[in-house]
Amino acid sequence: MQRSWYAWAWHAMAAPADDLRDTPPAPLPSALVAEIAAGAVPSPNIWNSPQVYEVENRAVDPDGVLEAAMRRIRPWDGATVLDLGCGTGFHLPFFAREAARVIGVEPHAALAAAAGRRVRDLPNVTVRVGTAQRIPLPDASVDVVHARWAYFFGPGCEPGLAELRRVLRRGGAAMIIDNDATRSTFGGWFRRWLTSYDAESVERFWAAQGFSREPLLTRWSFQNRDDLAAVLRIEFPADLADAFLAEHPGCEVDYAINLWWRVYGLAPLGGSRA
């Protein structure tokens, strides 16, 4: 679940997997791979292995822990939802069941095309090519922004945060999902891979940006060991992936995540409106 070189954050959302039975996207045409919007943060796992990433998406959070937490922050029934860094559109049908309008924005043209095919029969969903730094939407045009393991990994994402503020309506919410490297089996793997990762500095960054942290414990649940192996090999170097497989039995992995969230346009305690 790491979508960039700063990969302490690649993966997918998930309502229970049974709610997301869309046909996996076809392999990406090689001619489209180079069509990437300027400023995009590379996401080697989904860019290079979209079908394996689909398997990963389906394994994430079968208990709906993340979905429940997001609903507590800002329900999206009747709302306009932006899925920023939507990839092949895995989460678009999920939001479309209740939202009035859903917009997927993705910098990789081939992935955006796959997302468009996925939602072609959903009249309330559109997909556009664009980046977090230049969201192709008008000011104050969305109610909810969902960004899962995409671009917003801490220091350096300030241009994207400015864009979130611009496109969100007053009272709108940004919800950013990232890894919690301080706990869980996956968190331990993450620390062994990205030894320089500083969880405390990341938390300080988000607090300074006015975001709250909702720590959540989810899990991966794969159908078989082959699927787990395939996913580990797009998320970690081969030697580490093999070590993790050897150390960890079964097809489930406990996985801690952080839900960073902020509601815009509301007055903080003792302060002015933001």
Image (tube, rainbow, N blue to C red):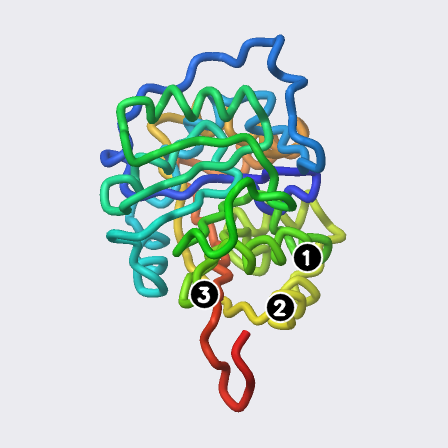
- Confirm or deny contact between disc 2 and disc 3 (CB under 8 A): no
> Which label lies toward us, 2 or 3?
2
Q: Which residue is mark 1?
A: 158
- At horizontal 31% and vertical 64% (from top left) the residue drawn is 72
Q: Which residue is mark 3?
A: 214
- At horizontal 71% and vertical 57% (from top left) the residue drawn is 155
Residue 203 at x, y percent in the picture: 62, 66
Residue 229 drawn above or below residue 133? above
**Local secondary structure at mark 2:** loop
Of residues 76 and 64, the one nearer the viewer is 76
Q: Residue furthest right?
A: 196
Residue 196 at x, y percent in the picture: 76, 52
Q: Residues within 10 Å of mark 1 (few under 14, many from 20)?
A: some
Of residues 74 and 188, the one nearer the viewer is 74
- Confirm or deny contact between disc 1 and disc 2 (CB under 8 A): yes
- At horizontal 55% and vertical 57% (from top left) the residue drawn is 166
Q: Residues within 10 Å of mark 2 (few under 14, many from 20)?
A: few
Q: Earlier in the sequence, mark 2 or mark 3?
A: 2
Q: Which residue is mark 2?
A: 209
Q: Amino acid at mark 2?
A: Gln
Q: Earlier in the sequence, mark 1 or mark 2?
A: 1
